[in-house]
Image: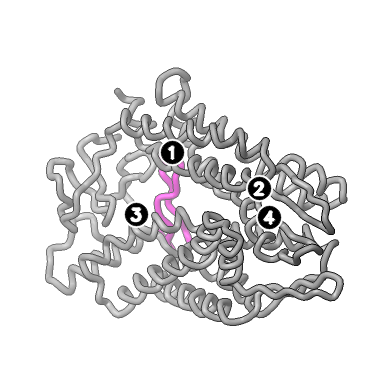
Amino acid sequence: MTSPKLISCEHCLTVQSNESPLCDFCELPVHHHTDNHGALQRAWSFLATALLLYIPANFLPIMRTTQLGTTTDSTIVGGVVLLWGHHSYLIAGIIFVASIFVPFAKFLALLSLCFAQSRVLTLSAQQKSIIYRATEFVGRWSMVDVFVVAFLTSLVQMGELMTITPGPAALAFAGMVIFTMLTANSLDPRLFWNSTHE
Amino acid sequence: MPLILCEHCSIAVTLGQLPDNHKASCPRCGHVLTRAYPNIVDRMLIFSISALLCLAISTIFGFVEMSVQGQERQVSLLDTSSRLAQNNDWILAAISLLVLIVIPSIFAALLAYLSFSLKIGQAKNSTIRLLRAISFIGFWNMCEIYFLGILVSMVKIASLAHISFGIAFYSYAFFVLFLFAAYMHFDKYQLSQLIKKSISTQQNKVLPNDLA
């Protein structure tokens, strides 16, 4: 069914043979999607950066609240526990899913994809595609907690009465999400299927 | 018969005539190849222009007002990043500005430009580059996530302060909705066919053989 000679232009989607370096219709360069090694190197380096950022993101405070002279630091996990204690179950649920469950699951998914592409782990191309599509769709939503901190900081500036400032974990967490997005972006799903008929 | 290569697994698929509001999925990996929308150009144009108008309204009026023990504080959409910059949180200020205003406005403007140039039948060779540019910016567009973050923060401080929403808050909600609706109609395959047809008729160029 597959013909290795066909290629689709990334710009105008014209299907053509892969002989010419330029697209038949729009004359822009065509991309061949065969560089598994380079894609994998990039994916691994982005993923390692994200994993390193994951540590400060979880252990350092993400938000600092000063209320009537007393300052309280809250971490991501601490924030969820506090909200649960205040009976805000819906918000606690949203933050738990977006900031704890999704990043953890995304790391597992990206690690298994990277290991599978490095031939350490065996996954079928079908499985890899399903994992890839899930991470692509869900990963961005982890940014919610960073945006909560950013918005609260800009809104709650009332001096002695109540002031909210961002903690160091906010940037680490934002960086972590961005680097996992870059990881997913550098894994080319076409390469999952190329390796099957090698 | 038009040919299409699956974006996820590179298999070649021949597309038959796709009825409106139906999608074609890849037989091997299940990735959605294309969706056929009726009046795709008109809809994209209307939704993206509505989104731009809503964003313009959002920047003028007050966004959220909060009061604690008689002290009142109002923020506008632009304040969300300028106040962070005043606190020397430069990176968070930049992220806020990019995510709330810069990226989504460029995104909406590109969608409007693309659909407008197709509407008046003036697609150029350079219009083809817009397809990838819009996909790229769509990947990084996170204004709907920021909006969820705003809702979460409102609930978080609802017990500590009195909160009221301004006109800008509601128009930003509509902006997020319209932008999503416009992007939903951004089907790379359908649009690439329209661009190619438009270029071919203008230049009397030979139609590529995969064109219906």
Q: Label 4 neighbourhood size at 10 Å, few (<14), some (14-19), many (20+)?
A: many
Does the residue at mark 2 contact the one at mark 4 (Cβ under 8 Å)? yes
Residue A59 figure quarter: top right
Residue at image coords 60%, 39%: A103
Name the residue tied to disc 1. Answer: B29
Of marks 1 and 3, the one in the foreground = 1
Residue A167, disc: 2
Q: Which residues lie in the magenta part?
A: B17-36
Q: Identify residue type, mark 2.
A: Gly
Instruction: State the separation of the CA atoms marked 1 and 3.
Output: 19 Å
Name the residue tied to disc 4. Answer: A165
Using the image, name the chain to which the residue with label 3 belongs: B
Seen from the viewer's position, the closer of residues A152 and A138 is A152
Give a yes or no on whether discs 2 and 4 share a subunit: yes
Give a yes or no on whether discs 3 and 2 share a subunit: no
Asked whether A198 falls inside the magenta stretch, the response is no
Using the image, name the chain to which the residue with label 2 belongs: A
Q: Position of residue A178 (x, y in %)?
A: 50, 45
Residue A155 figure quarter: bottom right
Residue B16, disc: 3
Identify the element where label 2 is drawn. Answer: loop
Q: Position of residue B156 (x, y in %)?
A: 77, 57
Identify the element where label 3 is drawn. Answer: loop
Does the residue at mark 4 contact the one at mark 3 (Cβ under 8 Å)? no
Is residue B124 placed above or below A37 in the rendered structure? below
